[in-house]
Amino acid sequence: MYTPKMKLTEEQLSILRGEQGETKAKIMETLVRYGDIFDAPEMVKVTHGCGHLVTSFGMGLLKPVFRICDEMIDAGLKVEDGFTMDPRPVDYKNVKCNLIEKAVFNLVMYGKQKDYEERLLKLGMKGNDPFSCACYFKEIGNIPKKGDVLSWAESSAVNYANSVLGARCNRNSGMIDIFGSIIGYVPKFGLLTDEGRKATWKITLKLTKMPEAQVLGSAIGMKVMEEVPYVVGLDKWIGTELNDDATGFLKDFGAATASNGAVGLYHIDKITPEAKELGEKLLVDNYKEYVIDDAELERVYKNYPIMWKNKDKEGQMAFIGCPHLSLKQLNEWTDRLTTALSKQNRKKVAVRTILCTAPAVKEVFMKSENYKKLMSTGAKLTCICPLMYSNNPLCKKHRIMTASNKLRTYTLARYYTTDELVDKIVGK
């Protein structure tokens, strides 16, 4: 048996000794070794039992993942409170592919999707379609409370849960997420501790106009990297209440801090739960400072590289919604596109335009008049992850435009501000 450095309870030791089965012992040993690497003093109980898993794609190369899933199933293990998943990788109806692109997806990349999802259902996945990177949407309902301890993965979901909801979760990897949910304990270190949640950077905003959430998040992420920022001055632009407008902004802002840096937690003065409670007491004594004005945001934006092979050509398609769009954001994008088309005396978008949202949000949206308006523009609505679409070596060659800094960072997509992207989609 592995000899842990951390202190374990008798119950935890019994699991590690194999008294609850060999497979459960392996899982516990993995979690303990993980915690020992980071000098965790102990394990803490997962208080929000519904997990969120990042590995949502049935890729044939993931044979070790399938083998571990089979071993857990054979041992009768599952997540009792269930779990949600990151988005599915493909949707041929709404994100069409040619025959060769489809062959790559089916034969080389995601050919094991059906088999993998059958395993996930046996392990406790909630229903048949809990696939979204934004599991905290009210339509999905995986919403932890302030102070809850989680065992989640997915950088933007962990970032949102820590920051906007005030829950506690480290930036876990795939499989660590389900291991913690099955065992019901995770190692206590990093963002699970009071000290680890203190801010080491004070970010002061001196802006004369509403910032793009994605560019502001990008600037902060690239500056602080994996550290915790405390942002002052954003309340001037998004208010002090966590309403739909503010949470939509913070979702996109946070995803950019997490992808352009490695931020797992941020505090927004007068807005996010811990900042409202403790204010600048969250700052460590020798914090660093970063002042962001209009010129700094412009500098950050202008320095994004253009990764297209033919940089001077126009974009061929646009992806909107990475992370997934909320219901309010879907309605806003519908209004933006229909208004812009009307001004140009056009009825249809000029390039392939694909909006991405959660299945449960899509279901609600499809019952609205705005769904008919959006479909009339020629745009498509999907629930896939555009990153996974772009992982196809043939698909990534398309000149993809986006207003997502996460998608820009992980693919060859070109970033445009919201207004610029609308102009590109509508055409002149």
Image (spheres, rainbow, N blue to C red):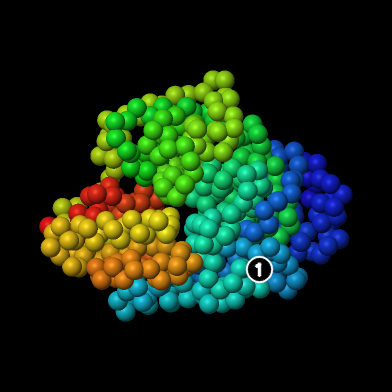
Q: Nearer the viewer, residue 74 or 90?
A: 90
Q: Nearer the viewer, residue 130 or 364?
A: 364
**Other-residue count near label 1 (Cα within 10 Å), few / some / many at <14 / 14–19 / ≥20:** many
26 shown above or below 363: above
**Residue visible at 29% across and 31% down?**
208
Position of residue 12 measured from the top left corner of the image (x, y, whole percent): 81, 51
Q: Please name the residue that numbered disc 1 is placed on.
A: 124
Location of residue 308 (image quadrant): bottom left
Left or right: 129 as drawn, with respect to 126: left
Residue lying farthest to the bottom in this orientation:
99
- Can the viewer see residue 55 in this picture? no
- Relative height, residue 220 to residue 376 (above, below): above
Find residue 249 and report its horizontal and vertical position in percent: 41, 46
Q: For the point 27% across and 47% down, which residue is it? A: 417
On the image, which quarter does residue 387 sit in?
bottom left
Report helix, strand or loop for mark 1: loop
Q: Nearer the viewer, residue 412 or 224?
A: 224
Q: Where is residue 331 in the image (x, y as percent from the top left)?
A: 35, 59
- Relative vertical location of residue 372 with respect to residue 218 in this rendering, above or below: below
Q: Which residue lies furthest to the front in this view?
A: 369
The image position of residue 269, as x and y in percent, is 49, 32
Query: Going by the image, does 155 lie left or right of 421?
Result: right
Q: In which quarter of the image is residue 67?
A: bottom right
Name the residue type under label 1.
Gly
What residue is at 44 percent from the left and 29 percent from the top? 232
